[in-house]
């Protein structure tokens, strides 16, 4: 019998992920989103427009790409969510894969609640850019049992070129949150460097070129530094200051849970908060440079 997959959340990242899953998996893919226009745009790729209710009744595995754990919990266990509509007799839905970046403790609690209903929760958050989501070259860090990972790996490989088993439930989120913490802190340092260099008579463009030739070279510099910071361009509908701040709060919560003080991440989170307060909440998160450089509020 052909496997039926569900995909809920086809926004900036989820659209490319869902498209690749439909093209490569050989499975029927049902999709739902708050904006069903996003789903209909994938019809040519074989994605079938659906609803949470229908996905709960028909899908064997459901993938989620949502903003945060609150939305994940609502879709899984809230009124009108997956648990409320699952067909217990059919026993089709057996695994939910959260590909969002979610709070670790709440992920583990949700996994326990779903397991009581016979449904496994696997955390498989994604890293890299929207372009990587479109190309199917994401990094996917997975928290699952060995058996669960082996079963899901072929589906995840449709969306990512690097699929890493990190350990049991929650560990995929730990690795993803640490990845984002290091990246965002690095971009904060780049923003500070650009502001200092510019006031000292060196252009941001020249600085980023020079850093790329030396020991400060990095993925963050190559992508964010050269293409956005150096050009003072921070579009909306990319990884925003608000999302970056949310992810750093997850990192700080992890630090507190293990009894460590992370002063570096606290500082970056404060800088992002300032950027949000200046009207840049929806701009690409390196926009913190504008606040550091004293360029004022978003008009």
Image: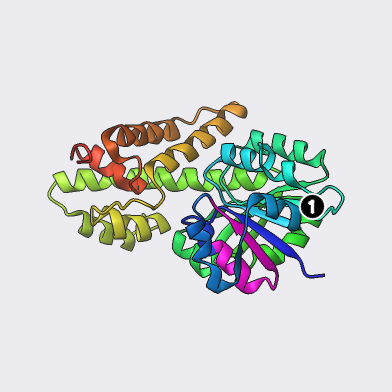
Q: Position of residue 39 (x, y in %)?
A: 53, 61
Q: Residue at x 87, y 50 (%)?
A: 89
Q: Is residue 106 above or below residue 61?
A: above
Q: Position of residue 178 (x, y in %)?
A: 54, 44
Viewer-side residue, 247 vs 73 = 73
The residue segment tinted magenta is: 17-33
Q: Position of residue 81 (x, y in %)?
A: 67, 42
Q: Position of residue 22 (x, y in %)?
A: 62, 69
Image position of 38 (left or right of 8):
left
Tell me, yes or no, whether the highlighted magenta stretch contains residue 28. yes
Tell me, yes or no, whether the highlighted magenta stretch contains residue 208. no
Q: Quadrant of residue 177?
A: top right
Residue 179 in view, yes or no: yes
Quadrant (top left/top right/bottom left/bottom right) for the C terminus: top left
Q: Which residue is mark 1?
A: 94
Image position of 40 (left or right of 83):
left
Residue 168 in view, yes or no: no
């Amino acid at each position: 019998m052909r496997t039926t997959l569900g995909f809920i959340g086809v926004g900036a990242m989820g659209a490319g992920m869902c498209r690749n899953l439909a093209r490569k998996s050989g499975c029927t893919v049902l999709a739902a989103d708050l904006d069903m226009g996003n789903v209909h745009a994938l019809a040519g790729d074989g994605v079938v427009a659906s609803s949470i209710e229908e996905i709960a009744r028909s899908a064997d595995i459901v993938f989620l790409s949502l903003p945060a754990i609150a939305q994940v919990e609502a879709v899984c266990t809230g009124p009108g969510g997956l648990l409320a509509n699952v067909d217990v007799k059919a026993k089709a839905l057996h695994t939910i894969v959260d590909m969002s970046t979610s709070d670790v403790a709440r992920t583990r609690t949700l996994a326990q609640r779903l397991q009581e209903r016979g449904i496994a929760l696997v955390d498989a958050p994604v890293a890299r850019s929207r372009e990587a989501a479109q190309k199917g070259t994401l990094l996917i860090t997975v928290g699952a049992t060995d058996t669960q990972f082996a079963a899901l790996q072929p589906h995840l490989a449709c969306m990512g070129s690097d699929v890493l088993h990190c350990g049991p439930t929650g560990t995929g989120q730990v690795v993803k949150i640490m990845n984002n913490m290091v990246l965002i802190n690095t971009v904060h340092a780049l923003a500070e460097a650009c502001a200092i260099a510019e006031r000292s008579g060196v252009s941001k463009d020249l600085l980023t070129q020079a850093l790329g030739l030396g020991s400060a070279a990095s993925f963050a510099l190559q992508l964010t530094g050269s293409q956005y910071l150096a050009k003072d361009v921070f579009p909306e509908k990319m990884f925003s200051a608000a999302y970056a701040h949310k992810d750093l709060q997850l990192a700080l919560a992890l630090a507190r849970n293990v009894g460590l003080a992370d002063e570096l991440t606290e500082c970056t989170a404060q800088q992002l908060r300032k950027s949000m307060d200046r009207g840049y909440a929806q701009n690409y998160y390196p926009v913190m440079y504008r606040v550091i450089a004293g360029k004022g509020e978003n008009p």
